[in-house]
Amino acid sequence: MKSFLLALLVTGLVWPWTAQAGGILEDLDAKQVATLNAGKLVAIPTEVPGGPWPRLQVYSIINAPVRDVEAVFRDYPGASSYIPNLVAADILEQPDKNTYHVRYTSSMPMVGKSSSTVRNIYSREDEVLLVRWNLIESELAEVSTGEFRVEPYRGGSLLRYTNFVKPKSSLAVLVKFAALGEAKQTVTAIKKEAERRGGK
């Protein structure tokens, strides 16, 4: 079941949500900012009426510039080298330079391999990188949309990863609290890979 959760999170399968305006730090209180500055993740689950799992937001400082984080995101062929249990991320179509249709295949002990296809759209707002996604098709989820936001911070980057999984399987309701741990693992993997490539 843990790998079932990871497959959903890695592919960005999430429940619709509304992005907050302003910088990432506006989301957080002083204690949470201090936690980030100490090198730790901040994770915030928010219950959604009628949703089987809470909306999850995970924040992290990455000791690499925004451009290096973006390079990690766009390197789909290399994703399986640092995301646990991800077998492949194959670009099926690229309608333009900032839009990718990607099929993610994950290995799950309980059900074998499972695939999902997601549309990822990149955009810039000044120095802020936004990666928004929505589900095209999936064996595991009904609806999904979400966002990475990465902005400059203290010589590196500040990342916010937001998602809310609405799975097809009713079994997933039983393990919704494990989803937060999986989201943290995904963000940590991205952080480590961006820092490794940047030589940090």
Image (tube, rainbow, N blue to C red):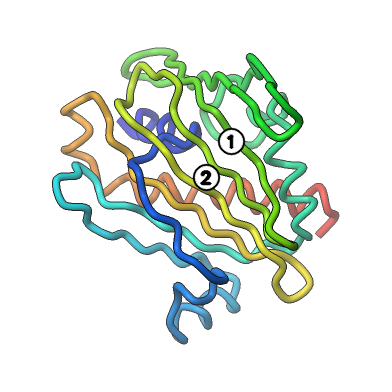
Residue 83 is labelled as 1
Residue 189 is labelled as none
**Relative to 55, 122 lies left or right:** right
Query: Residue, x 22% and y 24% (percent of image)?
Result: 169
Look at the image and tell me in which quarter the N terminus lies.
top left
Type of the residue with mark 2: Thr
Q: Residues within 10 Å of mark 1 (few under 14, many from 20)?
A: many
Q: Are marks 2 and 1 in contact (CB under 8 Å)?
A: yes
Type of the residue with mark 1: Ile
Q: Is residue 175 above or below residue 27?
A: above
Residue 151: which quarter of the image? bottom right
Whole-percent x, y for residue 116 in the image: 46, 20
Residue 186 is labelled as 2
Q: Residues within 10 Å of mark 2 (few under 14, many from 20)?
A: some
Whole-percent x, y for residue 199 in the image: 85, 55
**Relative to 113, 187 lies left or right:** right
Q: Is residue 196 above or below residue 109?
A: below
Q: CA distance from mark 2 to mark 1?
A: 7 Å
Residue 165: which quarter of the image? top left
Query: Residue, x 68% and y 58% (percent of image)?
Result: 125
Q: Secondary structure at mark 1?
A: loop
Query: Residue, x 35% and y 16% (percent of image)?
Result: 139
Q: Mark 2 or mark 1: which comes first in sequence? A: 1
